[in-house]
Image (cartoon, rainbow, N blue to C red):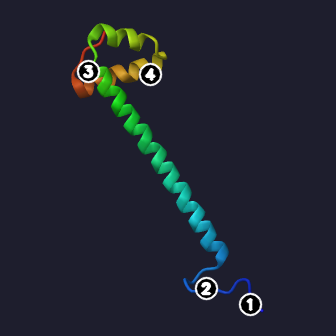
Amino acid sequence: MRDPLERGRFGMTGTELTVWVISGFLAVGVGWSRYVKYQTREKMLREFAAMDPERREKVLSRLQPELQMAIRQELMQRFRLKTDI
């Protein structure tokens, strides 16, 4: 009969290996979601920068005030675009 705490080929038990694998999957999932969020924000900023000013203001006015301010600041910093505040 094998000892349940016996170390395997890689110097760790099955439970330790399982915990490491699950932790790795969680880390990859968190990293992927942050990457997708970043890509979406980049795409949205580029679309706002490409819009004519009147349309941009119309679309911005439909957003939440905090998000409006954040987008306006990003547009000003990155693209030097002036938006009506």
The mark nearer the N terminus, 2 or 1, is 1
Mark 1 lies on residue: 2
Residue 61 left/right relative to 23 = left
Residue 61 left/right relative to 10 = left
Q: Amino acid at mark 2?
A: Gly
Q: Residue furthest left?
A: 80
The mark nearer the N terminus, 2 or 3, is 2
The mark nearer the N terminus, 4 or 3, is 3
Q: Amino acid at mark 4?
A: Leu
* Figure check: 5 above or below 15: below
On residue 8, the disc is 2
Q: How crowded is the residue under tag 3: few (<14 C-alpha within 10 Å), some, or many (20+)?
A: few
Residue lying at 21% horizontally and 22% vertically, measured from the top left: 80
Q: How crowded is the residue under tag 1: few (<14 C-alpha within 10 Å), some, or many (20+)?
A: few
The mark nearer the N terminus, 1 or 4, is 1
Mark whose residue sits in front, 2 or 4 = 2
Q: CA distance from mark 1 to mark 4?
A: 59 Å
Q: Position of residue 54 (x, y in %)?
A: 30, 7
Q: Position of residue 29 (x, y in %)?
A: 52, 51
On residue 23, the disc is none
Mark 3 lies on residue: 50
The mark nearer the N terminus, 3 or 1, is 1
In the rendered structure, are the residues bearing label 2 and label 4 in contact, judged by CB atoms less than 8 Å apart? no
Q: CA distance from mark 3 to mark 1?
A: 67 Å
In the rendered structure, are the residues bearing label 3 and label 1 in contact, judged by CB atoms less than 8 Å apart? no
Mark 4 lies on residue: 67
Q: How crowded is the residue under tag 4: few (<14 C-alpha within 10 Å), some, or many (20+)?
A: few
The mark nearer the N terminus, 2 or 4, is 2
Mark whose residue sits in front, 2 or 3 = 3
* Figure check: 33 above or below 79: below
